[in-house]
Image (cartoon, helix red, strand yellow):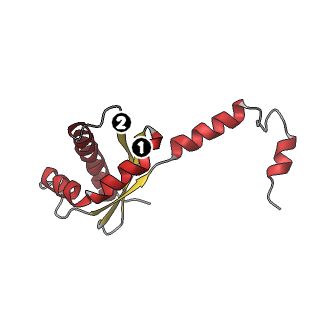
């Protein structure tokens, strides 16, 4: 369970990361790419922040994630400048792809294509673990 301090720091980092990443994408000439910060979680000792990114289109996600990871020191420095009056120390940043939208989309596609266990209960027997 996150403390109020962890939640506050995560919220501050999330807002500022959105600004930093969107500005970097537009200055970098990336047209038609949307980068959103879906979640930030901070460890108990406030030393590491795990940042989950949703990147659209999905085919660009892995390539952009590698670019973001290679620019981690610059992103961390920019965040430190923005939050210098709110945080004493800037946590280390770890970036991950948030694939929850793809997961939800896969479930919706399965339901529409006839793999709906509500309409066909025989599918449940096939999916049970032994």
Element carrying mark 1: helix
Q: Can you identify the residue that label 1 sits on?
A: 60
On residue 102, the disc is none
Name the quadrant containing residue 71: bottom left
Q: Nearer the viewer, residue 13 or 17?
A: 17
Mark 2 neighbour density, 10 Å: few (under 14) some (14–19) many (20 or more): some
At 31% from the left and 32% from the top, the residue drawn is: 31
For the residues bearing labels 1 and 2, Cβ distance under 8 angstroms? yes
At 19% from the left and 53% from the top, the residue drawn is: 79
Q: Residue 81 location in percent, x, y?
A: 13, 53
Q: Nearer the viewer, residue 50 or 114?
A: 114
At 44% from the left and 51% from the top, the residue drawn is: 97
Q: Is residue 120 visible?
A: yes
| Vertical position of residue 48 compared to residue 24: above or below | below
Separation of residues labelled 1 and 2 (CA atoms): 8 Å
| Vertical position of residue 28 compared to residue 93: above or below | above
Mark 1 neighbour density, 10 Å: few (under 14) some (14–19) many (20 or more): few
Nearer-N-terminus badge (1/2): 2
| Vertical position of residue 99 compared to residue 50: above or below | above
Q: Is residue 40 visible?
A: no
Quarter in which the C terminus is drawn: bottom right
Q: Can you identify the residue that label 2 sits on?
A: 33
């Amino acid at each position: 369970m996150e403390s109020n301090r962890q939640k506050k720091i995560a919220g501050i980092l999330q807002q500022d990361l959105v600004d930093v990443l969107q500005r970097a994408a537009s200055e970098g000439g990336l047209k038609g790419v949307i980068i959103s910060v879906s979640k930030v979680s901070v460890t108990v000792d406030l030393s590491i922040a795990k940042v989950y990114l949703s990147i659209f289109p999905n085919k660009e996600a892995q390539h952009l994630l590698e670019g973001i990871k290679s620019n981690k020191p610059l992103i961390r420095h920019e965040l430190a400048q923005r939050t210098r009056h709110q945080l004493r120390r800037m946590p280390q940043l770890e970036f991950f792809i948030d694939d929850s939208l793809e997961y939800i989309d896969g479930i919706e596609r399965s339901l529409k294509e006839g793999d709906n266990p509500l309409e066909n209960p025989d599918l449940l027997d096939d999916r049970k673990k032994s």
